[in-house]
Amino acid sequence: MVDVAAAPLGVVNALASPGALDRLVVPGRALACRVAEDELLLLCAREDVGEIVREVHDRLGAGDADALVLDVTDGWVAATLSGSDRRGAFAFLSALELPEEGFVQGEVVRVPAKVVVEADRVHVLVPSIWEAHLHDRIGRRLAHLGVGA
């Protein structure tokens, strides 16, 4: 069994020197995803975005005066797969190999995506311009499982 739902995640982008990002103490309310040596995406609840931006900006600013921390929530959409067959369902969406828990990036339903695997769910994040495509493709590729996106 698998369920697919829109995920109202907040997304914060932190750009700084690799050393500053290596030393960053990530707020406990955020999940850090290193997308490049000088770039970090932080996922959190939407209501925490403002606080996460302020905390990360203050922490990075101490080690990199040129650090940039932005709320980019509006630039991303997410779909969450949950249920006992979430991993099997994901295999119909992408050839990416999922870790037990963690972060990978690559192609999902033919668009660049960030994928976060938690103990009980899989979040697929894509640029917001691909929102309709993401939901349409998930619905089509998982229709045989009785899933609509």
Image (cartoon, grey):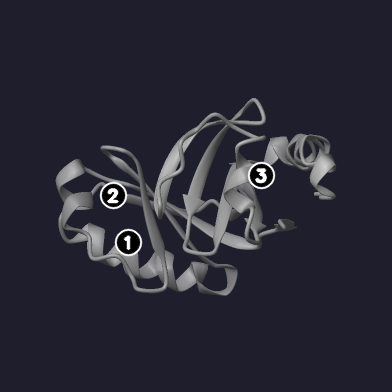
Estimate how packed mark 1 is, as few (under 14), some (14 to 19) or many (20 or more) residues with alpha carbons within 10 Å.
many
The three-letter amino acid code for the residue at tag 1 is: His
Look at mark 3 in the image and give the residue it sits on: 89
Left or right: residue 63 versus residue 60 is left
Residue 67 is labelled as: 2
Q: Mark 2, residues whose alpha carbon is within 10 Å: few (<14), some, or many (≥20)?
A: many
Q: Amino acid at mark 2?
A: Ala
- Give the SS element for disc 3: helix
- In what element is the residue under mark 1? helix
- Mark on residue 118? none
| Upstream in sequence: badge 3 or badge 1 | 1
Relative horizontal placement of residue 146, taking residue 41 as reference (left or right): right
Residue for point 74% across, 41% down: 131
In this orientation, does residue 3 appear?
yes
Q: Which tag, 2 or 3, sits closer to the chain's start?
A: 2
Q: Which residue is mark 1?
A: 57
Measuring 43% from the left and 41% from the top, which residue is drawn there? 104
Depth check: give the residue in front, 7 or 119: 119
Disc 2 secondary structure class:
loop
Q: Is residue 43 left or right of residue 83?
A: left
Q: Is residue 4 above or below residue 140?
A: below
Quadrant containing the N terminus in the rendered view:
bottom right
Q: Amino acid at mark 3?
A: Ala
Residue 64 seen in render: no
Q: Quadrant of residue 101?
A: bottom left
Cα separation, mark 1 vs mark 2, equals 7 Å
Where residue 72 appears, x then y in whole percent? Answer: 54, 51
- Specify few, some or many for label 3: CA neighbours under 10 Å numbering under 14, 14-19, or 20 or more: many
Q: Are marks 1 and 2 in contact (CB under 8 Å)?
A: yes
Q: Measuring from the top left, give residue 90's x and y in whole percent.
A: 62, 42
Q: Distance from label 2 to label 3 (Cα)? A: 39 Å
